[in-house]
Image (spheres, rainbow, N blue to C red):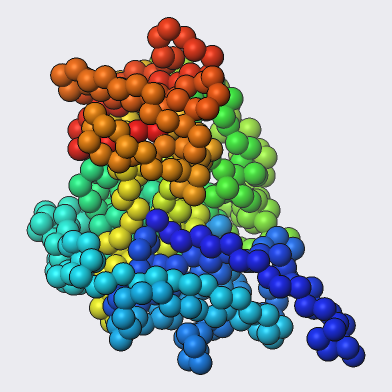
Amino acid sequence: MRRLVTVHWLLITCLLVACVAPVTPPEKFSLITHPDGRLYVGDQVSFEVMMPSGFKPEGHEVQVSLGDKELGRAGFGPYGVAGRTEATLWWAWDTRDLQPGPETLTFTLLPDDLTWQETVTLQPQSGVPPPEPGAHWAVLTSDCCILNYITGTAAERDIASLAQVADEEAADLSARMDESLSEKIPLVFMPRVLGNGGFAGNAIYVSYLDNDYLGNATAQVLHHEFVHWFDTLAGGDLRPTIFQEGLAVYLSGGHFKPEPLIPRAAALLELHWYIPLRTLADEFYPQQHEIGYLEAAALVGYMVEAYGWKAFDAFYRDIHATPDGRDSQAIDTALQAHFGITFTELEGSYLELLKGQTAPADVRDDLRSSVQFYDTVCRYQQALDPSAYFMTAWLPDYMMMIQRGIVADFLRHPGGMDNRLIEAMLVNVDHSLRAGEYDQAERTLKGVNVLLDVLTAYPNNGMQTSVCPALRTKVRVPEGFRIGAYSRKIKTFRRVCQPAGSSYFAVVMVASGYHYGQIPPPIKGAMMFVSQLKYGLHHNCR
């Protein structure tokens, strides 16, 4: 898991320099190290230093030192989709010549000369988890793309079929968007989940792994990201995000799977989830992910149907920034120039279309469950795998990784019992959604959120180790709790953790499926969760 370290600053008073006004430092900065989890001898370590509330970053930078040796320095700036203000020091600390054990790093805020220290323990290189010790970057060239992958991963195993899928999706879009490739597309397969599974930038980055809890919809994700690539090739000035993402979902026929876009968007009205278009245009990414992408895609589909592809494309390529910096105003200006309507009038006709639709029950149920699913995924990532959260995902430049021989930043990710359990549950939610088993999906999601409630209420530093004799293993339980009961039948077991007070928390896991409810007989404050035992998750007692 990412390391999050809270740093308390020393107050500087005018007693230090009597003639100079005192510097009042911010209360605390936060530090995150990469790669995720434990650090090992041989790692090339990066640092993210996040500023506290109220700190003004202009003119400041952070310097990191080991003893008398400066490792690097960086100024503060926006990071990720969220634009989080931080100082990012990429691969500043090369540990290849060090020995296992603790190392003390000094961080200095310049030009204020305020310093603090952090102790980081390096594990022996012999402990690096597989497949990393023998892994390296490899390349395969196809008709459309240069496929970059790490050996020893699922991508290496399936690289021939991945190349074929990439060629098919790229050829489809080249014809539909009437754009040719003058150079092959750099494609990077990541052996872990990052964000929502795909990013487009200096290359197309796609998560590819077995048991991907976002679903192994590689062709769909590739198609979506290829749209962004061809969209960039086609040009344009502003290209507002609402149309960039809307176009990608529209031309892919759905977001994470094929979907009827207009009926699905009509269901937004029935569920009271519709986002006003000006809000969506000006603040796209902070909106609920599935809702924003769907609404934008249906809008693109409506405009293509109403005006034709060529007219829509000409409008989209001719949107220019306005003095107020708002995308909604830029769209309004371009709409008047191309179609003689305002943004408000476009939304009115769009809403009229949606209100005239009747969303089938299965479409509505799928949308409701999908929104709950992706909200839960974001909650899980923020709580237990923050490097994966799409707004601030840790996404290094693959070319620099290849140049430096780095694979750890993509191979390592949180893999504790909590992560394995919840990710296995999310995999099953995805399977239920794709099978149309919405009640089952929502029951499982309730269980996931109950566990996240407990894990966030009792974080790692509030856990203690207890012995579960029936399992013959040590388990972690919240402080003040004890193992109160244990029973086992064929492929079934229960563990109850009893707190010092009168309430109970239970985790009940059954091989046959999921259930969520109270412990019978009902006890005030009791919770029960049932999980499918598929991935060797047999020792997680809370």
Q: Quadrant of residue 61?
A: bottom right
Q: Quadrant of the N terminus?
A: bottom left
Q: Position of residue 396 (x, y in %)?
A: 38, 69
**Residue 232 visible to the viewer:** no
Q: Quadrant of residue 528?
A: top left
- Residue 453, relative to residue 440: is it above or below? below
Q: Residue at x 43, y 7 (%)?
A: 521
Q: Residue at x 49, y 12 (%)?
A: 523
Which sits in the foreground, 474 or 46?
474
Residue furthest out toward the top: 521
Q: Quadrant of residue 442?
A: top left
Which sits in the foreground, 258 or 441?
441
Which sits in the foreground, 283 or 70?
70
Horizontally, residue 520 falls left or right of residue 489, namely: right
Residue furthest out toward the right: 19
Q: Quadrant of the C terminus?
A: top left
Q: Position of residue 423 (x, y in %)?
A: 32, 40
Horizontally, residue 194 falls left or right of residue 109, namely: left
Q: Residue at x 43, y 77 (%)?
A: 103
**Residue 10 visible to the viewer:** yes
Which sits in the foreground, 320 or 252?
252
Image label count: 0
Q: Position of residue 235 (x, y in %)?
A: 45, 66
Q: Residue at x 29, y 55 (%)?
A: 192
Horizontally, residue 388 falls left or right of residue 323, namely: left
- Residue 367, relative to residue 208: is it above or below? above
